[in-house]
Image (cartoon, rainbow, N blue to C red):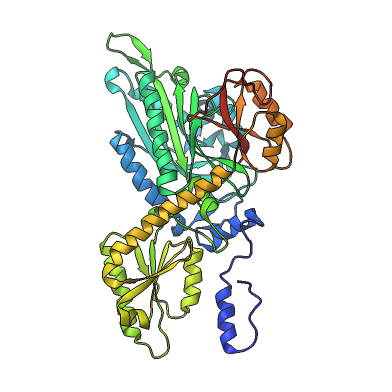
Amino acid sequence: MSTNKGGGGGKKKEVKKETKLGMAYKKDDNFGEWYSEVVVNSEMIEYYDISGCYILRPWAMEIWELLKEFFDAEIKKLKLKPYYFPLFVTENVLQKEKDHIEGFAPEVAWVTKSGKSDLEAPIAIRPTSETVMYPYFSKWIRSHRDLPLKCNQWCNVVRWEFSNPTPFIRSREFLWQEGHTVFATKEEADEEVLQILELYRRIYEEFLAVPVSKGRKSEMEKFAGGLYTTSVEAFIPNTGRGIQGATSHCLGQNFAKMFDITFENEKGERSMVWQNSWAYTTRSIGVMVMTHGDDKGLVLPPKVAPIQVIVIPVPFKDADTTGIKGACESAVYTLNQAGIRADLDARENYSPGWKYSQWEMKGVPLRIEIGPKDLANKQVRIVRRDNGTKVDIPSTDLVEQVRVLLDGFQANLLETAKAKRDACIVIISTWDEFIAALNDKKLILAPWCDEEEVEKDVKARTKGELGAAKTLCTPFDQPDLPSGTVCFASGKPAQKWSFWGRSY
């Protein structure tokens, strides 16, 4: 609704007040502005006075807590233990693993003063915690009986980004979990990498209703200092950009060498350990917003919606307001007792229409309206946020019907997002096809020779205002590669199919 429709007269003024909730930008017209508007207007974030830092409000934090509840329970089944390591790390420790620090160096924030006096040596704020933790792993691990060591911490990290800070997607401080595990054998490490990656897939697909591809990163894109990196990759059709959803790394024995993490095996010999590290962040919330949001605001998957059902009384003049309010309170109580997150909007200073707009903006999956007719017929009206369909159901069937609708809503979001993502996938075989698909905002599946120099060359040749193209991942689900297939970029024999595109 546009905001310029209000004219004179009392009633018009009320309508004008209601339209203030509308969005100024449309998702398809100006995606960047639309996204900023959605995350602020839905009360997920507030901008802070330091660029690239954001205040996460309850509407975002409650989603993060619901994801945390699921993931924490799952990793505890895998015998992960909770730890908390300090935020600070000394310069000499941070720089111990050269490739690792080179990968993070431009983003490291340093503390150089205490009050007015300079510190003797600058102290870094963790961009990730490998170098914080591993000196102590070396101290704690002596024998094969000390393995595996499995540690997870929920914390914040700081990466002083300079390129286009975006709420949730690229911020200078963000929340995450980081798991760090130590094993006696590579087989155990390899197995866990995939177990964790599957949990990340479940976070995105089962909870956030965002389709992802599981795969392996190229040598150029892998975690600095690691052996190999696996990831779940999402895609944003509106911008034609891939986005890394979460990563699970096998670090091999590289950090064990640097930090002297060894153990005495069963034969009494010293052996080097194998290590993994893995993480997902509050970026996941931003990916969900980008995937499902529409021109009315957020659309939240029921599994992560802080409120799954909002109940709104719709009293008319001379209606039995007490009876309507009682029916609304009863509906909320019944749903809450059944484990459904429901709430009542009983504010009297806002009209029902204004409330509808606000809860649509906040993305609540289902709205229940109860007016005089509903009260008389012992029914409620339910409106879906995703497609706007309305259904009247008897109050006696409330819990059962709401459950069916929530399940259908969750499934529909994933199906719709998957159809949109799949419609963007283009399989190419030549450079010209690659450039055409890239300019058409596609997710490109291409045969590749798997050579780092070729990837660097693709990056260099596609540099421009929109950013260079790169490999997103080599999907585990590989299509057939007929013999004689050549790399799209080099003409050399192709080794694999990889996803390419621009990315966040």
Question: How many numbered marks does the figure carry?
Answer: 0
> Looking at this view, is 210 or 267 the one in front?
210
Q: Is residue 160 visible?
A: no
Q: Quadrant of the C terminus?
A: top right
> In the displayed structure, does residue 499 sit left or right of residue 338?
right
Q: Is residue 288 above or below residue 124?
A: below
* Residue drawn at the location 26% of the way across and 20% of the way down: 145
* Residue drawn at the location 29% of the way across and 64% of the way down: 399
> Looking at this view, is 333 or 29 the one in front?
29
> In the displayed structure, does residue 390 sit left or right of residue 22?
left
Picture coordinates of residue 315 (x, y %)? 40, 83
Determine the image quadrant of residue 336: bottom left
Picture coordinates of residue 65 (x, y %)? 39, 51
Q: Can residue 148 be seen in this view?
A: yes
Q: In which quarter of the image is the N terminus?
A: bottom right
* Residue drawn at the location 41% of the way across and 64% of the way down: 366
> Looking at this view, is 186 or 274 the one in front?
186
Determine the image quadrant of residue 198: top left
* Residue drawn at the location 49% of the way across and 76% of the way down: 353
Picture coordinates of residue 331 (x, y %)? 30, 71
> In the displayed structure, does residue 41 sit left or right of residue 428?
left
Picture coordinates of residue 223 (x, y %)? 53, 29
